[in-house]
Amino acid sequence: MARQSRPTVLLTRPLAQGARFAAAVAQRFPDLPIVSAPLLAPVFLSPPLPPVEFAGLILTSETGTQGARRFLADGVALPKRAWCVGDQTAAAATAAGFDAESARGDAAALVALIKVQKARPPLLHLRGRDSRGDIADTLNSAGIETHSAIVYAQEPCDLTPQAQAILAGDAPVIVPLFSPRTAALFAAVPDLNAPLWVVALSPTVAQALANLPVARLVTATKPDAAAMITAMATFFPTNA
């Protein structure tokens, strides 16, 4: 690609997840500049847990796993078994000392796995304040006693001046978006003058962009980082 038209990758994920994805992008596309500008940052909460002896945990994010670590550090007893939404969450849970299993998908895949394997209740879902759907209600309706605790909130952040300048320019900006909430926050950013090449994690994420005009939009075939990188490669057919 010509240097003067080279796009910039703008990462809006929280810092920890964004840094890992940035490394994967740099490995696949070493010539692309990358700018990190999180639109969300976690704030951890310490809710009282139900007075129940839980048989297993449900973890739907790495941040939820950090919440579990915080409970353990405070001396709160948690079960060793952890049912995780995806491989990254399972890896984080394993590193925290849990016996973790990944559903390798989304919340629906996680619920299906728990049902198929007939997980022994009661279960505890450590989740964020703004998580989509209600896994606990779904499992309770299926006869699997499940409680939930909100252990973190993702609070909105302003874009950095560097990110604002890139978006106000005329060179293309590649924007990988991993959640409907982040997509909605990005769609509300003013002065989006640059041609936007958006990579959405799922159709739901793409829909959250509402009427935001984008020059290109591609949706990952699977809800994971590897599929996001593959989807991004479609912008550069000769390098795909």
Image (cartoon, rainbow, N blue to C red):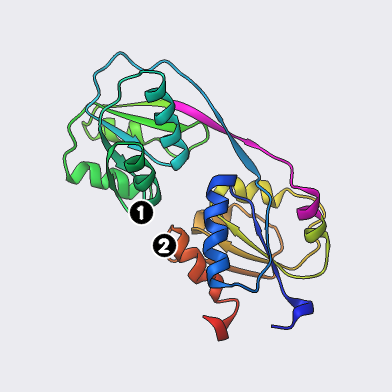
In the picture as drawn, the residue positioned furthest to the top comes out as 51
| Residue under the point 62% across and 64% down | 198
The location of residue 140, given as percent across then percent down, is 27, 30
Q: Which mark is residue 222?
A: 2
Disc 1 residue type? Gly
In the picture, measured across the screen, residue 19 lies left or right of residue 137, that is right
Q: Say which label, 2 or 1, has the lower sequence index.
A: 1
Q: Amino acid at mark 2?
A: Lys
Relative to the observer, which residue lies in front, 26 or 180?
26
Given the current orientation, which residue lies at the most extreme bottom position? 238
Circle 2 Cα neighbour tier, 10 Å, few/some/many (<14 / 14–19 / ≥20): some
Residue assigned mark 1: 105
Q: Residues within 10 Å of mark 1 (few under 14, many from 20)?
A: some
Q: Mark yes or no: residue 14 visible.
A: no
Q: Which residues are magenta?
A: 150-164
- Specify the quadrant that holds the N terminus: bottom right
User: Which of 210 and 58 lies nearest the eye of the viewer?
Assistant: 58
Q: Quadrant of residue 77?
A: top left
**How far apart are the alpha carbons under marks 2 and 1?**
8 Å
- Residue 115 to residue 228: above or below: above
Q: Could you tell me which secondary element the residue under label 2 belongs to?
A: loop
Across and down, in percent, residue 219 comes to: 52, 65
Q: Is residue 145 visible?
A: yes
145, 74: nearer the viewer: 74
Q: Residue at x 50, y 64 (%)?
A: 228
